[in-house]
Structures are given as C-alpha cells and as structure tokens.
Amino acid sequence: MRALIAQQLARAGAAAMLIPSDKPDHLLYTSAWGFYPRGPLPVLSIGKEDTLTLRRLLTKGNVAISLDVQNSFGTSTATERNVIAELPGTDADEMVLLGAHLDSWDYAQGADDNGSGVAAVLDTARILKSLNIKPKCTIRFVLFTGEEQANLGSRAYIEKHKQELDRLRTFLMMDDGAQPAIGLQSNTRDDFVAPLQDLLRPLVPMGAGKIYVAPSVDSDDASFMIAGVPSLSLKVEPGDYDIRHHPSTDTFDKIDPRALALDTSVLAATAWMIANAPERPGRRLSAQEVQELLKKNGLELARETILGPTEP
C-alpha cells in the first residue's frame, strides 16, 4: 500500500515521502518492500522521536524541511538463485512445499527476518531425513531469495514451476520470527479450515492447533495465494519481533532457541501430516476465484504490491 501512496504523492507533486518508524526512540526502519526496482519519489524513514517533534511543530503551523539525500542506482545486475531440495514421496503425483526467504537488510544480521525461518526449514529437512521414512507425497524445501524486493524469488519459482502448481497440496512457510507458535494462518482461505483443524489435531497439545484466516500480503505466501495455491504461514506470538523487524537490532543474540525448536517441530509435523493425509485439505483456485477472493477481503489494491509495482 505504501507504494501506491507514493505514486499518488508523486503525481500530486510531493518532493518526498517520510515514513515514521514504529521502532522505539530513534531506531530506523529499513525497507524498500513494494518500491522495487525504485520508488516514484524519495522515500525516507524517520525515527519515532523525530516524528513526534514534527507533529508538535505542525500544531503551530507549516514546517519547512531540508533534505540532503545521498543515493545512487547501480547499472549492473546480479543473478540470485533459490535453493531447492526435496524428500521424495511414494506417490509422485502431489507435493507439499515448505519455504522461507534467504535475503535480509544490510543494517543487521537478518537473524529473525528471516534467518530463523531458514533455520527451521533446514532443520525440518534434517529431522524428516533422519527418520529414514518416506512420506506419501513429496516434501520439497525451498529457500527463496528476493523476498524483500516484493517476493521476487517466490514469483520466479511459480513461473518456472507453473506446470506443477496443480500438484501442490499446500505451500507452508515461516517468516514471523522465532516466537512461540500458536497456529497457522490460511491467508483468507476459509474453505479448508475445517479439514485442516481435523488433520492437525495433534498440534493442539503444542498450543499450535488453531487456524487463523487473516490475510497476509507481504511475504512469499502471497505469491502462492495469487496463484490459487492453498498457502499457510506459521502463526506465532507477537513478542518483541516487531521491534526487531528491519532495524539494526535484528541480531543472532535475540533468537530464543526454545521457541525456534517449537516452531521447527510444528513445521515438521504440519508438513508430514499434510503430505500423508488421504486427501489434500484444499484445492487450487482459478484465476477468477482468486480475483473474487481479493475483492471479498478488500485486497484489490494490494495486488500490485503482491506482484511488484510497475515502473513509475
């Protein structure tokens, strides 16, 4: 939505767009999500305390701001790759896809966004492989690149593997940090909530058996939602993740090993149970049905952000 607002401001003649940071004190929020490959006007993050100062000044009248933005765009391009592995099933006709994104932001280590998700996917693969048992459906593991530039990696995966999408039982991912798991989010799809809750009943004692229907449009699950594929993301307690999301404080020392172990257990169990279920919990939607789903949930304007904005 920020990208759409930026386009409107640019058309109205605005010189720049200031995004107040939701982090404490002067901690800046770093992100160009939705502005890839570049925004229609300069966009800057300003600290919470600076925002409060500006608002106090604005109560007394207009405020003049002088900006000195040092920035440049490179002319070279780089090729990035998704990382893919799989645990073959006894029935090759269908598969479950488990993913997380590899990329992060420069000012920190990206430990929780999304190093924790990558670690959970890798450890899920290790756990299932070490059991030396075969699932009914193939379980494929994917580490996407370019999520922070509007899901480039997952969109590229869908384009390259579009002939396989009808075979996908579910896309499952983790991208909300290593906080205690409380369930799964079905991304506006309420048609497979009941089958999933019955199938995933073993997660109840772990506190993660609830299915949330709320939409998510800012990570790789949105790419699969647009493609009509049933998508699930791990739902976790908020904790202090939002404070560490995208600023310089997203570092390894903040990760809770116990919470990460629980998240990994939930992902592994969910992937295994869906892969071995007699039937898939939900079907793939047609393009028309996806459009109706977006409209029903007020997400038509978010479609451009999900798919990536066009050049201004």
Image: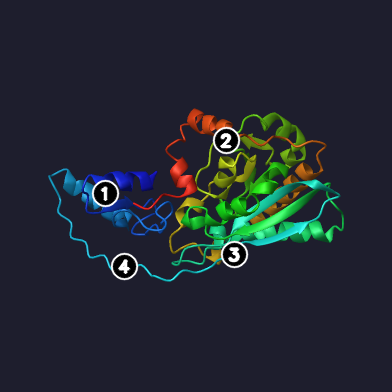
- Residue count near mark 2 (Cα–Cα under 10 Å), binned few <14, some 14–19, many ≥20: few
Left or right: 13 as drawn, with respect to 231: left
- What residue is disc 1 on? 10
- Residue found 28% across the figure and 52% down from its top: 17
Q: Are marks 3 and 1 in contact (CB under 8 Å)?
A: no
Q: What residue sits right under mark 2 in the picture?
A: 287
**Tag 2 or tag 1, which sits nearer the N-term?**
1
According to the picture, the residue beneath numbered tag 3 turns out to be 81
User: SS at mark 3?
Assistant: loop
Residue 71, label in figure: 4
Q: Which numbered disc, 2 or 3, marks the residue closer to the eye?
A: 2
Residue in view at x 37 percent, y 48 percent? 3
**Residue 146 drawn above or below residue 268:** below
In the foreground, 84 or 210: 84
Helix, strand or loop at mark 1: helix
Position of the N terminus by quadrant: top left
